[in-house]
Image (cartoon, rainbow, N blue to C red):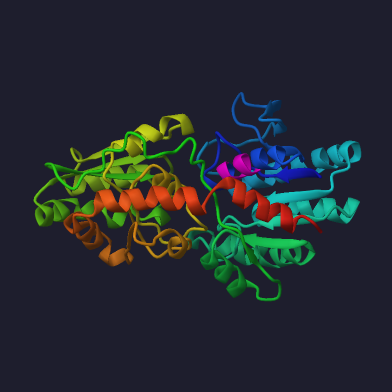
Amino acid sequence: MKILIVSHEYPPIGGGGANACKFLSREFVKRGHSVVVVTAGFESLNGIAEEDGYAIHRLPCKRKHREHCSFAEMSDYINRAMPYCAQLQNLAHFDVCMVFFGIPGGVVGRYLKSRFSLPYIIRFGGGDIPGFQERFKLIYKFVSPFVKNIWHHASALVANSEGLKKFALDFCPKYPVQVVPNGVDTDFFSPEGSTVSDEGDEVRLLFVSRLIKRKGLQNLIPHLKDIEKACGRRVTLTVVGDGPYRESLENLCTFHDVEDRVSFEGQKDKEEIPPYFSKADIFVFPSSREGMPNAVLEAMAGGLPVVMTPCEGAAELIDGNGIIAEEGEFYKSVIEAVKSGRLADMGRRSAKRARKEFSWGQTAEKYLEIMKL
């Protein structure tokens, strides 16, 4: 099968959806399929390259940041990707188009369907569903009719968690939504070298993700001293990632006098992440809304217990390997996890669940079954 993948984000730009695009492409090729990815370039990273047996076409776009993308930048990608993908279709005659995110990729998929009758499936990311992010409220109102049209013409709609499926159906219940959970690279992320401890003088918290308000760190930082007092151990928080909310979080640390306890490490490449997992005791994820967070899956594969909010994906990810905590009570659940004396045990359970239930190979097989249109 010849598969065209349209995604405006592909590593090193983007977040969890970009990683999913990469790993699924690799798994499709392993199973004998031909894959071409059309994505946005970034800085000097443009042109055509080959990776793990598939081609990556990076279009010169106006994207300014690795970790986030504006609607204007998405529109620029759409305008460049539509004619480019049309040329590719004339040459390669793809069997199916897999679109990462209903917006912006879905616009390209809809165009190819109308011009070439090329079937497309949409893999939701979360923010592409109107209503997902409060800050885009006005824009969602404008694009909602177009989104529904894109969904109507898609051959399949896929969410990566039951929670995201429900959110999609709350927006538009007319079209069926399937669920295929994210996977994780358990060869790369492993519990080897993990130092999770229920003892010692320090509790090492770790957060890895984009720094935007929705991720919820503002609900944890003010309570670091409360956690210290309750647990009788020094508490540190390492923040890996970058984004537009970083300055606000740094100011919050200053206001609550915890600058010496919080370390902002900035954006890191995938190869730089595992050492952070091996040096942490608890992975914290206080996000208000997700699809299924890859960062949590990677932390699980790295052998970390998890404290996270009941955002989309939590129900599938947490089962004896952590605690699901409401936003307002989040720091209290961190205290509960520390006092349980089960951090090491929960970490081992995380790694076991990641290996057994969330491999990218299993995820790819489910998508390939859907692509048999």
Nearer to the camera, 15 or 354 = 354
Percent x, y of residue 196: 26, 43
Query: Is residue 103 in view?
Result: no
Is 32 drawn above or below residue 311 in the view shown?
Answer: above
Left or right, residue 193 beside residue 16: left
Nearer to the camera, 182 or 308 = 182
Residue 288 among magenta residues: no
Residue 22 among magenta residues: yes
Give the residue drawn at x 83%, y 50%: 112
Is 220 drawn above or below residue 73 in the view shown?
Answer: below
For the magenta stretch, what is the residue range? 19-24
Percent x, y of residue 100: 66, 50
Left or right, residue 232 beside residue 3: left
Q: Quadrant of the N terminus?
A: top right
Percent x, y of residue 180: 60, 59
Magenta stretch, main secondary structure, is helix
Please identify the quarter of the rendering in which residue 339 is found: bottom left
Give the residue drawn at x 72%, y 52%: 368
Q: Which residue occupies the extreme top position in the image?
A: 44
